[in-house]
Image (tube, rainbow, N blue to C red):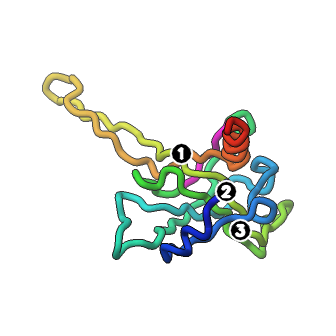
């Protein structure tokens, strides 16, 4: 996605980016599998501003890959404010037997949302549901970068 680098520099805004041909996993999710370590970046719970202007980095792992799905799951605590943040493959020198290590930090996708679960409190006296609690499961849904790239390309064709 094109950005106006001169404008960012003029306003003394620090920035960095992933070069499309070097650090983006364009083959779907072919370089990753369950158990691979990742970093999830973002500004959860509004932790951004003048004194908090640095990204929050959370570590996690790939929890589930499904070739028939347009998303995959990571095991990392994600909160409101992380949505749209990048998920990056952690470079590794070693790999499990039968797999290949990846020594490059690939941009794998962007965070869609955390997945919640519901816990129900039932009255002992009436056996009826009294309260339903919704909690963060620690799992998050991620949109692979190939789908993000496809959406950007389709948008650019409309302008």
Sequence-first disc among 2 and 1:
2
Residue 50 at what x, y percent from top left? 35, 73
Asked whether the residues under the numbered discs 2 and 1 touch, taking CB atoms below 8 Å apart as contact, a structural biologist would say: no
| Residue occupying the point 29% across, 34% down | 120
Query: Is 88 left or right of 51, judged from the image as shown?
Result: right
Residue 121 at what x, y percent from top left? 24, 35
Q: Please say if 115 is above or below 31.
A: above
Q: Please say if 134 is above or below 140.
A: above
Asked whether the residues under the numbered discs 1 and 3 touch, taking CB atoms below 8 Å apart as contact, a structural biologist would say: no
SS state under label 1: strand
Image quarter (top left, top right, bottom left or bottom right) of the C terminus: top right
Label 2 – label 1 distance at C-alpha: 22 Å
The residue lying toward the viewer, choosing from 97 and 40, is: 40
Q: Which residues are magenta?
A: 70-75
Circle number at residue 2: 2
Residue 23 at what x, y percent from top left? 75, 64
- Disc 3 crowd rating (10 Å Cα; few below 14, some 14-19, many 20+) is some
Query: Is 146 left or right of 53, judged from the image as shown?
Result: right
Image quarter (top left, top right, bottom left or bottom right) of the N terminus: bottom right
Residue placed under numbered mark 1 in the picture: 112
- Disc 1 crowd rating (10 Å Cα; few below 14, some 14-19, many 20+) is many
SS state under label 2: loop
Label 3 – label 2 distance at C-alpha: 22 Å
| Residue occupying the point 75% across, 38% down | 67
| Residue occupying the point 49% across, 50% down | 83
């Amino acid at each position: 996605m094109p950005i106006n680098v001169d404008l960012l520099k003029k306003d003394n805004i620090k920035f960095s980016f992933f070069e499309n041909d070097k650090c983006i996993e364009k083959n779907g999710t072919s370089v990753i599998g369950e158990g691979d370590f990742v970093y999830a970046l973002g500004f959860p719970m509004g932790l951004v501003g003048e004194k908090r202007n640095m990204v929050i980095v959370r570590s996690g792992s790939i929890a589930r890959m499904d070739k028939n799905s347009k998303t995959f799951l990571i095991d990392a605590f994600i909160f409101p404010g992380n949505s749209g943040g990048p998920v990056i493959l952690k470079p590794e020198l070693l790999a499990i037997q039968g797999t290949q290590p990846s020594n490059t930090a690939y941009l794998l996708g962007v965070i869609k949302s955390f997945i919640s679960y519901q816990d129900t409190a039932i009255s002992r006296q009436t056996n009826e549901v009294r309260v339903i609690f919704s909690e963060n499961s620690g799992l998050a849904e991620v949109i692979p970068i190939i789908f993000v790239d496809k959406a950007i390309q389709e948008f650019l064709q409309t302008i």
